[in-house]
Image (spheres, rainbow, N blue to C red):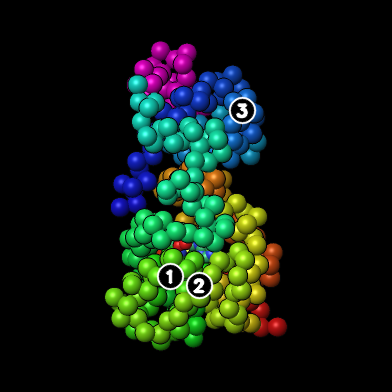
Amino acid sequence: MYDLWLGQWLFPSMIAADELGIADILHQQPAAADDIARKLNVNGLGVATLCDLLVCLGFLSKTKDAYSNTQYGNKFLTSASETGWGAIFRPLQAGENARKIVDSIKKGGCHIASDGNTFSEMWEEGAVTEQAAREFIPRMHCLILPTMRKIVSNKLFAMANSVIDVGGGSGALGVALAEAGLQCKYTLFELPAVCTLADEYLKAAKAANYNMHKGSFFTDHWPMGHGVVFLSNILHDWPPSVGMSLIQKAYQATAPGGKIVLQEMIMDEDKTGPLIPVLFSLLMFINHTAQQFTRSELFAMLETVGFVNPEVTEAGAYYSLVTASKPLI
Ligand SMILES: C[S@@+](CC[C@H](N)C(=O)[O-])C[C@H]1O[C@@H](n2cnc3c(N)ncnc32)[C@H](O)[C@@H]1O
């Protein structure tokens, strides 16, 4: 399902790259994302995200300093090539996804919105409307519930007496814990309008051992002393500096000897693969001017605030669990 859902961005990315003229710029000489962005007067993260996808697809190559066209980039994406596909791409420029990619790179993110309010702004202000919650939360629930059902078999959850699910959306983790009959106490830390919906999902799953902590994880108190502090698909909604501040708060909320658990799709160290996490990163740029992370970026964030022994395990459906411990003293 993720292949099909995120695959919808593949050809529109080629149309967008053609419209922006990326391969024509690189036909002259290799260039870094920021240099391409300066030339086009567009967003640097957006260019890097699109170029990383083009590397993944084989049209560009990437070194530490710069992107270049591969033979396929020169053959199919440059306007001077007699086999260039401009004649195919250009009539498709008005397509919705191609427009979203180009507009987000030009404006620095398109920002998924409900009734004229962007989710990023509502989340930052801690004030999501009921309508916005009803639009967004069912989407997250169907995307993540199968993975939650898989990860609750991890001994982490069997051994913890309490888990706080920070920005836990529909409470899908609580649903999966209840279905598995695990005793660990589940706390959902969410915005009030989302808690109302999550309560419906948790009641339908006959969950009993749970409570709601209604508030904003930016401005409100974090309940302390949890054995597991869980953040799924949270860091990817924000720039790294905001993610760092959430991890710092998570450290305070973790009991000594307890664990932080991040659930994210992780990209390779050079950010050009695997394909589905790279496409997810493009979607996070379009929706929130944000990105997926690499393993070493996540480890560095955790270790900076004092967590130790970071590890990665597979969670299923392209997701990974990144765990790390808070030392006992
Ligand atoms: C991408 S969703 C992830 C949901 C869930 N963790 C999952 O993996 O499906 C981000 C979640 O963060 C929540 N969120 C955003 N800003 C928040 C804030 N300031 N305080 C609490 N929760 C917030 C949103 O309501 C949303 O449910």
Where is residue 169 drawn, in percent x and y? 43, 65
Where is residue 313 drawn, in percent x and y? 47, 66
Q: Quadrant of residue 270?
A: top right
Q: CB atoms at circles 3 and 2 under 8 Å apart?
A: no
213 sits to left or right of 41: left
Specify whether residue 83 is painted magenta: yes
Q: Residue at x 37, y 46 (%)?
A: 6
Tag in front: 3 or 1: 1
269 sits to left or right of 115: right
Q: Quadrant of residue 328?
A: bottom right
Q: Residue at x 33, y 47 (%)?
A: 5
Which residue is more in the foreground, 203 or 268?
203
Q: CB atoms at circles 2 and 1 under 8 Å apart?
A: yes
Q: CA distance from mark 2 to mark 1?
A: 7 Å
Q: Amino acid at mark 3?
A: Asn
Q: Amino acid at mark 1?
A: Cys
Where is residue 100 drawn, in percent x and y? 44, 36
Q: Quadrant of residue 12?
A: top left
Q: CA distance from mark 3 to mark 1?
A: 41 Å
Against 55, residue 143 (above or below) is below
Tell me the crowding category of disc 1: few under 14, some 14 to 19, or many 20 or more residues within 10 angstroms, Cα based. Answer: many
Specify whether residue 277 is painted magenta: no
Which corner quadrant holds the C terminus?
bottom right
Against 297, residue 314 (above or below) is below
Give the label on residue 195, or none.
1
Give the label on residue 41, or none.
3
Where is residue 287 drawn, in percent x and y? 48, 46
Report which residue position mark 2 lands on.
214
Which residue is more in the foreground, 28 or 301?
301
